[in-house]
Image (tube, rainbow, N blue to C red):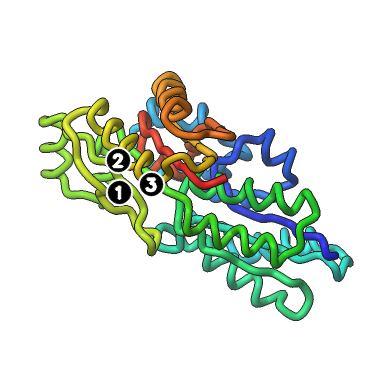
Amino acid sequence: MGKVKIVTDSTADIPKELVEELDITVVPLKVHFGDDMFEDGINLTPEEFYNKLDESNLMPSTSQPTPFQFEEEYKRLAGNDEDVSILSIHLSSRLSGTYQSAHIASLELENDVDITVIDSKKASYAIGIMVTEVARLAKEGADKRACERRMNELLHDTSVFFMVDTLEYLEKNGRIGKASAMLGSLLKIKPILSLNDDGEVFPYEKARGQKKALGKIYKELETRFGTDQVYVGISHAKAYEEAAVIMKELEDRLNVTSSVMTSIGPVIGAHVGPGTISISVTKS
């Protein structure tokens, strides 16, 4: 039985202890503040990023890994072992060119290494919740076919909702117009956002204030998952206390068998801003 190696990128926001425990390879995206470039999670932690965001007048930008970076990681993982196969699971292709870079690298090595590149059609720990499930299977000795089958289930069964604290970052990144951002802020409208089947951000619903928005999310998750056993992930941008309260509420409402709380990293944080909370749920 061949060994299965799992690769993802830094936008999956997987806690370091899980990355190490499950032997996941994480390829970093980059964050730019003017002429200064940082690698997400390598030389810029979430805490450092949000501090820089507070102190800087510059709006950060982000960039994807190059195909060469993926190619180097794939070659390192495969080594000289012909039995190694790789599953490479990445940020929605509608949000970044990361998937495309990984795909180009896989084509360069297609005669030498068995690589399958998967578009998660998700972001932040909505990717991580799937990656960790598949990585756990691989660590237990499952073959590539079993890992791919589980991944297909996860792509179908994973739900994600997120709320931003301010519409400023979405407006600056061109997701909504300036007038909409101003109106939403004045009326204290809390948009509930999600990702559609194509991996694009869309407004799921709107509510007046966070409490009502959360109520709508809880109700929808209870409807979708009922009494099914679920794995819950919450990622947050400098909003630990709020995230902890939400996790407790979900553990009371759903049949939660495992849960993870993590920080939204610099790349996703640059697009959604501090105060954002994302809730991801999948069948366990």
| Disc 3 target residue | 224
Q: Give the quadrant of residue 2.
A: bottom right
Spot occupied by residue 57 in the image (x, y as percentages of width and height) = 33, 33
Spot occupied by residue 271 in the image (x, y as percentages of width and height) = 37, 44
Is the residue 5 above or below the residue 58 in the image?
below
Along the line of sight, which residue is nearer the eye, 190 or 150?
A: 150
Residue depicted at x 50% and y 58%: 155
Q: How crowded is mark 3: few (under 14 residues within 10 Å), some or many (20 or more)?
A: few
Cα separation between marks 1 and 2: 6 Å
**Marks 2 and 3: which is nearer the front?**
3
Q: In this view, does 199 lie to the left or right of 68?
A: left
| Disc 1 target residue | 173
Identified by mark 2, the residue type is Tyr
Residue depicted at x 48% and y 63%: 97
| Disc 2 target residue | 169
Identified by mark 1, the residue type is Asn
Observer able to see residue 52: no
Q: Are marks 1 and 2 in contact (CB under 8 Å)?
A: yes
Q: Give the quadrant of residue 149.
A: bottom right
Spot occupied by residue 19 in the image (x, y as percentages of width and height) = 68, 41
Residue depicted at x 66% and y 35%: 16
Instruction: Identify the element where label 3 is drawn.
Output: helix
